[in-house]
Structures are given as structure tokens and as C-alpha cells.
Image: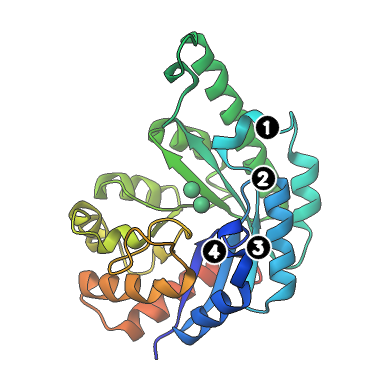
């Protein structure tokens, strides 16, 4: 059986708490050999580390999600440095910029609020990039409706830090700009959706050694589980669609995507 990794899972979310050992066992049975658990704030990052200590095939990424920026400390760097020293931490994130929901969308809010909010996200993203550059770790990047600003923020660090633009849903031209910075993209279950044709076209154009696979569970369950809670085992369904799109065997896809992941995340072996 061809094995794959789930390079982006929110295993620490309460959705999984009642049956974590079973979720991890089902992934293993489906050939998903490693699961990377992604932190979204300090508490979540600490939970990710705990899971990585508990399960030998789980690894942790530590960081603060841009959508939770209002609760973030002024300077996250001391905490990031401390957590980054843990041997089961394989990257920083998820970090980045998310302009999907801006303060001005709330009734009575001033448009100037948006600028303050974006500046706060930019500062938090930059702190991750700085600590990544210091520690030699790469960054898991979340980008939504903020492409130009995200690329501009990453650009000055691109000689020292690589990013993976996770849950990639942009076109092939954007993918090439990301690859030109030395960064990667990764694809979720959206690949299997009926309306995912544009993303399948992007994957078709992406070189076999420049992308990874992920669930982003509990979200984005692939067909035939669409709409249900997603879990790491479903990388199997994602990989089958990805193999068809790339016109390669599952063994080739396994070898390429797992090697890319081992090259991107620290100490994944
Ligand atoms: Zn994300
Ligand atoms: Zn995520």
C-alpha cells in the first residue's frame, strides 16, 4: 500500500477529543504514516506538542492563526522560540494573513479598523518569519483574500525561510510565483469536489516535487465524505484524486510528496 502524510491536521480540536486513539489508528490503517498537527494559538500549539509526545506518528507545528490576531500577545516571539526548541516541533504556523472577515463588516465599525487589523496580522506574521529565520524552521502559511500582501511579507525572508501555502486554492500563475520564492503549496480534499476543477488544473500544472497533501481536518472532508467531519485517514481519497490528476501511480505520488514533506519539515523522520 502506498503511504502518505497528512501535513495539516487540527487534531487538537475538540471534534477529535472523544476518540483520538481511534482517529490516529484509522489513519495508520489507511496508510497515512505521519500526521502533522497544526497549532492556531499558544494553547492549541501546546496541545499539538502533547499529542506529538503521545503518538509516535504525530508531529507538531506551533504558531498563531491570523484570524485570532485580536487575542494574540503584542510579541509572540519569546513563546515561539521556547516552543520551537521542542524536538517534536517540525515548523512554525499556521501563520499568514486572512482578510476574509474584516472588522468593517460588523455594523457600526469604522473602515479605519480594517487597516489596524491588517497591520496587527502583518506584525504577527512577521514575528513568525523572524523566529523561523532564527531557528531554521519553515512556516505553514494561511492565506485568504490576501495574496499580494502575503507574498510581499514573505519575500524579504525568502532566502532563509520557506513557506507552504496550505489549502491551496489559487491558479497556476499564483502557484508559480510561490514556487519562485522557493516555497511550496499543499492541496486538500477540495481536489475531489465536483466544483474543484480549477484546483485540479492548478495541481496538474504543479511539479510533482513541489506540493504536499493535507486534510485541514476537521474541515474539508473529501468526496465521498463531503460535509462530514474530516480526519487524517481521508488523505487516502485525496491522494487517489491527486494521482489521477498527475497521471502517475500512487507509489510515485507517495514517494514524491513524502520526500517533499521530509525536506520541508524538520526532524520528520
Ligand atoms: Zn489555514
Ligand atoms: Zn489549518
- Give the image location of residue 107, x and y in percent: 45, 13
Q: Quadrant of residue 220?
A: bottom left
Q: Which residue is mark 1?
A: 71
Mark 2 → mark 1, Cα distance in angstroms:
9 Å
Q: Is residue 100 above or below residue 138?
A: above
Which element carries disc 4, helix, strand or loop?
A: helix
**How many numbered marks have been drawn onto this rendered protein structure?**
4
Contact, CB < 8 Å: mark 4 with mark 3? no
Q: Is residue 135 left or right of residue 176?
A: right
Query: Residue sitting at 63 percent across and 53 percent down?
Result: 39
As helix, strand or loop, the secondary structure at mark 2 comes to loop
Which mark is on residue 264?
4
Give the label on residue 60, or none: 3
Q: CA distance from mark 2 to mark 3?
A: 13 Å
Relative to 142, 11 lies left or right: right
Q: From the image, which quarter does the C terminus lie in?
A: bottom right
In whole angstroms, how far apart are the C-alphas of marks 2 and 4?
A: 22 Å
Q: Which residue is mark 2?
A: 41
Q: Of the residues under marks 2 and 3, which one precedes in the sequence?
A: 2
Q: Residue at x 65, y 47 (%)?
A: 63
For the N terminus, the image quarter is bottom left
Decide which of 11, 255 is in the foreground and name it: 11
- Tell me whether the residue at label 1 lies in contact with that at label 4, contact meaning CB atoms closer than 8 angstroms: no
> What secondary structure is marked by label 1?
helix
| Position of 220 relative to 129 (above/below) | below
Going from N to C along the chain, the mark reached first, 2 or 1, is 2
Asked whether the residues under the numbered discs 3 and 1 touch, taking CB atoms below 8 Å apart as contact, a structural biologist would say no
Image point (50%, 78%), residue name: 27
Residue 265 in which image quadrant: bottom right
Amino acid at each position: 500500500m502506498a503511504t502518505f502524510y497528512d501535513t495539516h491536521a487540527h487534531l487538537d480540536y475538540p471534534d477529535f477529543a472523544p476518540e483520538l486513539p481511534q482517529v490516529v489508528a484509522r489513519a495508520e490503517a489507511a496508510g497515512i504514516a505521519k500526521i502533522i498537527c497544526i497549532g492556531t494559538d499558544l494553547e492549541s500549539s501546546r496541545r499539538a506538542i502533547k499529542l506529538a509526545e503521545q503518538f509516535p506518528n504525530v508531529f507538531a507545528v506551533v504558531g498563531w492563526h491570523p484570524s485570532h490576531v485580536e487575542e494574540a500577545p503584542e510579541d509572540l516571539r519569546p513563546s515561539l522560540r521556547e516552543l520551537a526548541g521542542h524536538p517534536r516541533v517540525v515548523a512554525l504556523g499556521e501563520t499568514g494573513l486572512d482578510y476574509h472577515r474584516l472588522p468593517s463588516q460588523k455594523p457600526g465599525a469604522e473602515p479605519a479598523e480594517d487597516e489596524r487589523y491588517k497591520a496587527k496580522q502583518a506584525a504577527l506574521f512577521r514575528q513568525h518569519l523572524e523566529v523561523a529565520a532564527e531557528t531554521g524552521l519553515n512556516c505553514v502559511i494561511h492565506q485568504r483574500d490576501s495574496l499580494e500582501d502575503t507574498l510581499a511579507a514573505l519575500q524579504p525572508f525568502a532566502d532563509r525561510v520557506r513557506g507552504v501555502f496550505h489549502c491551496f486554492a489559487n491558479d497556476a500563475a499564483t502557484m508559480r510565483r510561490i514556487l519562485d520564492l522557493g516555497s511550496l503549496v499543499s492541496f486538500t480534499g477540495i481536489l475531489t469536489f465536483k466544483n474543484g476543477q480549477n484546483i485540479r488544473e492548478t495541481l496538474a500544472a504543479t511539479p510533482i516535487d513541489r506540493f504536499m497533501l493535507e486534510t485541514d481536518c476537521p474541515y474539508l472532508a473529501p468526496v465521498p465524505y463531503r460535509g462530514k467531519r474530516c480526519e487524517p485517514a481521508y488523505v487516502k481519497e485525496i491522494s487517489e484524486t491527486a494521482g489521477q490528476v498527475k497521471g502517475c501511480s500512487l507509489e510515485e505520488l507517495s514517494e514524491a510528496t513524502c520526500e517533499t514533506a521530509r525536506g520541508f519539515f524538520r526532524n520528520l523522520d
